[in-house]
């Protein structure tokens, strides 16, 4: 089962509280990724693991744009909050992986995130191939 906004409300409270968030140094050597990342405390280690796998597997060039982790907003498909509202999701290469498309994420790239504890939006009924979110919190 995927993490829901109800799960996040239960664990972290209202998104505006942000007591579960912090600014992390994240100088990973990939120029398209910011050197500081504001995200959920539960997100940082899986994210570091995913990016390390991307680098180890020679896929750093796959990250062309870093399109954000934290943004308090409702989902586009219903009235619940997006998991970005609690900083446990990241969008990558949004310009070529729009919601509702197959996108062009390679299986090898997606595997780096799945191996690190993320679900991938490209596998959903309403595909969102730019989107990766924590599999559990």
Image (cartoon, helix red, strand yellow):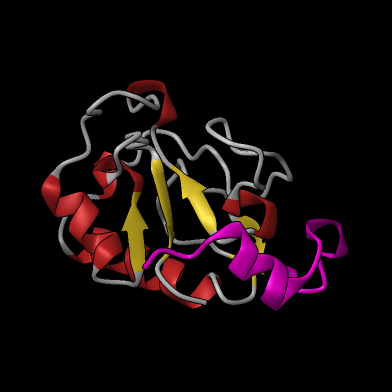
Asked whether 19 or 61 is in front, the reply is 19
Q: Position of residue 128 (x, y in %)?
A: 37, 36
Q: Tell me what residue is drawn at x 68 percent, y 52 percent.
A: 85
**Relative depth, front residue between 125 and 69:** 125
Residue at screen point 24% across, 45% down: 123
Q: Is residue 18 magenta?
A: yes
**Pick the front one: 132 or 22:** 132
- Identify which residue is drawn at 65% across, 46% down: 80
Looking at the rendered structure, the number of numbered marks drawn on it comes to 0
Which quarter of the figure has residue 47?
A: bottom left
The N terminus lies in which quarter of the figure? bottom left
In this rendering, is residue 91 above or below 35? above
Residue 23 appears in the figure: no
* The quadrant where residue 11 appears: bottom right
Question: What residue sits 25% from the left and 28% below the top?
Answer: 103
Residue furthest to the right: 17
The answer to whether residue 41 is left or right of residue 107 is: right
Horizontally, is 9 left or right of 50 in the view? right
Q: Position of residue 18 (x, y in %)?
A: 81, 65
Residue 134 is situated, as x and y percent measured from the top left of the image, at: 45, 66
| Membership of 37 in magenta stretch | no
Q: Which residues are magenta?
A: 1-23
How far from the left and from the top, in percent, is residue 9?
71, 67
Q: Tell me if I can see residue 93 in this picture.
A: yes
* Vertical comparison of 111 with 122: above or below: below
């Amino acid at each position: 089962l995927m993490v829901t906004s109800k799960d996040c409300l239960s664990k972290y409270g209202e998104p505006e509280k942000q007591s579960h968030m912090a600014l992390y140094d994240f100088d990973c050597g990939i120029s398209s990724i910011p050197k500081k990342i504001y995200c959920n405390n539960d997100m940082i280690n899986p994210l570091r693991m995913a990016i390390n796998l991307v680098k180890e597997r020679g896929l750093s060039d796959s990250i062309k744009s870093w399109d954000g982790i934290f943004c308090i907003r409702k989902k586009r498909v219903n009235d619940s909050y997006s998991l970005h509202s609690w900083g446990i999701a990241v969008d990558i290469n949004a310009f070529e992986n729009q919601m509702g498309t197959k996108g062009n994420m390679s299986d090898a790239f997606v595997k780096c995130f799945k191996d690190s504890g993320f679900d991938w939006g490209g596998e959903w009924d309403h595909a969102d191939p730019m989107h990766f979110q924590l599999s559990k919190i």
